[in-house]
Image (cartoon, helix red, strand yellow):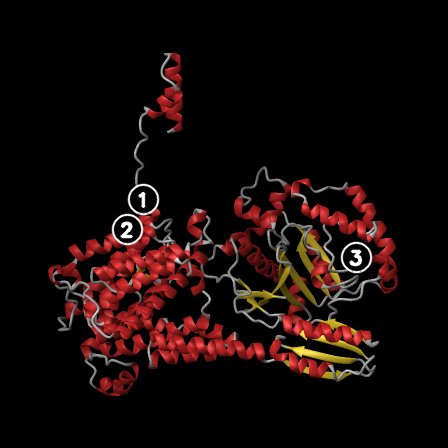
Amino acid sequence: MSACVSTHASDSDRTGGPSGSARTAHSPPPPPRRFRIAGADLSASVAVFLIALPLSLGIALATGAPLESGLVAAAVGGIVAGCIGGAPLQVSGPAAGLTVVTAELIQRYGWRTTCAITVLAGIAQLGLGCLRVARTALAVSPAVVHGMLAGIGVTIAVAQLHIVLGGSPDSSVLANLASLPRQLVDAQPATLGVSALTLTVLLAWPRIPGRIGRFARKVPAALIAVTAASVTAALLGLSLPEVDLPSWSSHALAGLPDGPVLGIVAAVLTTTLVCSVQSLLGAVAVDKMTAKRSDLPPATRRSNLDRELLAQGASNIVSGSLGGLPVAGVAVRSTANVKAGAVSGNSSMLHGVWVVAATLLLVPVLELIPLAALAALVMAVGIQMVSLNHIRTVTRHREVLVYAVTTLGVVVFGVLEGVGLGVAVAVGVALHRLARTRITHEVDSRGVHHVRVRGQLTFLAVPRLSRTLHQVPHGAGCVVELDGSFMDHAAYEALQDWQKSHTTQGGKVEVAGRGGARIAEPARASHTCCRPWTPWRNHHCDRPSHDHDHDRDRDRAAPEAARPRRAGGHQLASGISAFQRNTAPLVREELARLAREGQKPTQLFLTCADSRLVTSMITSSGPGDLFVVRNVGNLVPLPGAESGDDSVAAAIEYAVDVLQVQSITVCGHSGCGAMQALLSSPPSGHGALTPLKRWLRHGMPSLERLSDMGLPWARLAGRAPADAVEQLCLTNVVQQLEHLRKHECVARALERGALELHGMYFHVGEAQAYLLAETDPVFGQVAATALDGSLDEGSATRA
């Protein structure tokens, strides 16, 4: 438009036309923007539609609602949530996680009141979205969420099993289990055969091998299973209950809520809770998948959770008003949408349009589907909701009790009651862990007292800590070892007060971390400005301490661009002078010993050449401890790789075979320029490559590993990586550890059990180190070995 206005103005100037403002006002209007749909969105919408159609009917059947209500919810969820949602690639519709809730509401209040409850739940979601509390929902313990889904899955599977056997389910899980033996005896062969065929195709279709399998997997297994069951039933002439879609003129819409007020309020809260939590967790899961794709704009890769909550609320209002099931984000359809290559919310909207078209044009075809096939399909979904991966995760986190109580609570009492029990147990477990602190007191052979604190040091442990500390005699030496990641204000003050009192009375106190590593030591008067906790930005020890502090405060107050920059030569000479004066006298004896005996490092430390990564600082190591190799991107070229760097391979061989190190650590870090370069412009081709790009080609396997949708993302102390660069930094560490295993000397040492491999990640901005440990023989996924008392499966944990 601006180009058009500029041309018009030039013509007017040559003819003595009106002023610029008038010309702008009368310039031709811009052409209307065209609504364009990417081809990827179109194909993805068809794939999602083929999955949504049978699942929507099956979920409606499982709830006891009119079958067309599932189609209404699928259409509304796709169109409304896809149009205004904050998670563009998440697909919404009737969810299996809402089956138990909806079925109970229909049985208790009837269908029209259930629709009204759905509308009220949508209004509640709108309120929560306006309050911007979406992130708060993510604070619910994953064990509670996984337990809730598992309990719902068990309830669905047991109920649908009765339909699969040719009967009808009871109102509760316990009643269904009690009547299951009788139902097995009275099983209907035709119904059981159709259901078995559906389950067999569901399991076998994704496992077809070879080229045929790759082609076949493009068609959803659910659609093939239901189609096979329908065709088989028709060819054999089986008389089975089938889908019955009544005329839309008789479709029941929402009515006024009819029931006790407290019961309606509880139902609204339950529906709101399940819909919101499932949708928000689904949006976060979609973010993890989309962050690995480089073809998406930044706005699509990260969800706006508050906006997504508003969209889910609007969808539930519309769906409930039109007589549809409650709507939530659905993991199966969302995963299919991302894997099919969708690039915007248009795919979700189109899938809703296809559902509308199917309900209008394909009713005769849909009415050929046996109900037993839909029941088998929903039963399979329910079984999948009891995830073995989730069970392994909560087991590693020692949260099996929370998971089990939530699951049993949902199965026996209901969703809201089960979640409430799970949250209560989770809080109890957290308080127990917080209050469980072991404090021991020992005296070694030298007469030094050791007070060891195991666990978190809070006000609850202050009486025991004070009692133990006062057992140390006046004037004695004492080492206090704190083996935990948290100390509250009350415990800190109690420890500090005792330390001051004990020191005043002639005693000596040393506060140490895990394993006795010293936390702080008294500063020497000769170089008080060089204490370990002194910030070193523009720091020089060749000036008096008060001058240094004054200049440092002045530099911090100045803008970044205005801070003084000292010449490199001056800094080098100044640093050498400070070393000779302050540090050399302290380390001369140790360095003399190393000079006589030679180096005997215990580990090879391979890290990036980044200037912010100070290996000795983050590993608390000194001269002779580490054999350090640094390069751009902490890369380990594969043996014999094209344009390989023998210097890295030579260092590895020397460290393993000559120095006989016991471990090799690959350390990556945040904000790595090499990883940013790989993401922005991966090196390609064989000509005109700069030395840097030739070197970065050794990082291409890490980039390929990042795009592998089959591998899980690492987490940093319970949070997801901030962006794709951070995820690539973590992935690169894992990939380089695999490269290490390919080196012959490393493979031999590993086979003998003489060598260990470790991965490490250092977050520069947080000054936080994370230790990555292997969970399978080839570092197939990243898990964390906590060095601070916390443990998080599939994650890197704080050191």
Q: What residue type is labelled 1?
A: Ile
- What residue is pinned by disc 2? 350
Along the horizontal axis of the image, is 503 left or right of 761? right
Q: Do the residues labelled 2 and 3 touch (CB within 8 Å)?
A: no
Residue 37 numbered mark, or none: 1
Locate the C terminus and report the quarter of the image it occupies: bottom right
- What residue is pinned by disc 3? 530
Query: Which circle, 2 or 3, is nearer the viewer?
Result: 3
Relative vertical location of residue 53 with respect to residue 577 in this rendering, above or below: below
- Mark 2 / mark 3, whichever is N-terminal: 2
Along the horizontal axis of the image, is 422 left or right of 618? left
Q: Is residue 342 visible?
A: yes
- Helix, strand or loop under label 2: helix
Q: Residues within 10 Å of mark 2 (few under 14, many from 20)?
A: many
In percent of the image, x 73 and y 70: which residue is there?
A: 517
Q: Where is residue 662 in the image (x, y as percent from the top left)?
A: 71, 68
Gap in angstroms between the C-alphas marked 2 and 1: 9 Å
In percent of the image, x 38 and y 24: which residue is there?
A: 5
Gap in angstroms between the C-alphas marked 2 and 3: 65 Å
Query: Which circle, 3 or 1, is nearer the viewer?
Result: 3
Q: Where is residue 765 in the image (x, y as percent from the top left)?
A: 62, 55
Along the horizontal axis of the image, is 475 left or right of 298? right
Closest to the observer: 605 or 305?
A: 305
- Helix, strand or loop under label 1: loop
- Helix, strand or loop under label 3: helix
Classify residue 581 by image quadrant.
bottom right
Q: Are marks 2 and 1 in contact (CB under 8 Å)?
A: yes
Closest to the observer: 684 or 734?
A: 734
Q: What residue type is labelled 2?
A: Leu
Relative vertical location of residue 424 with respect to residue 246 in this rendering, above or below: below
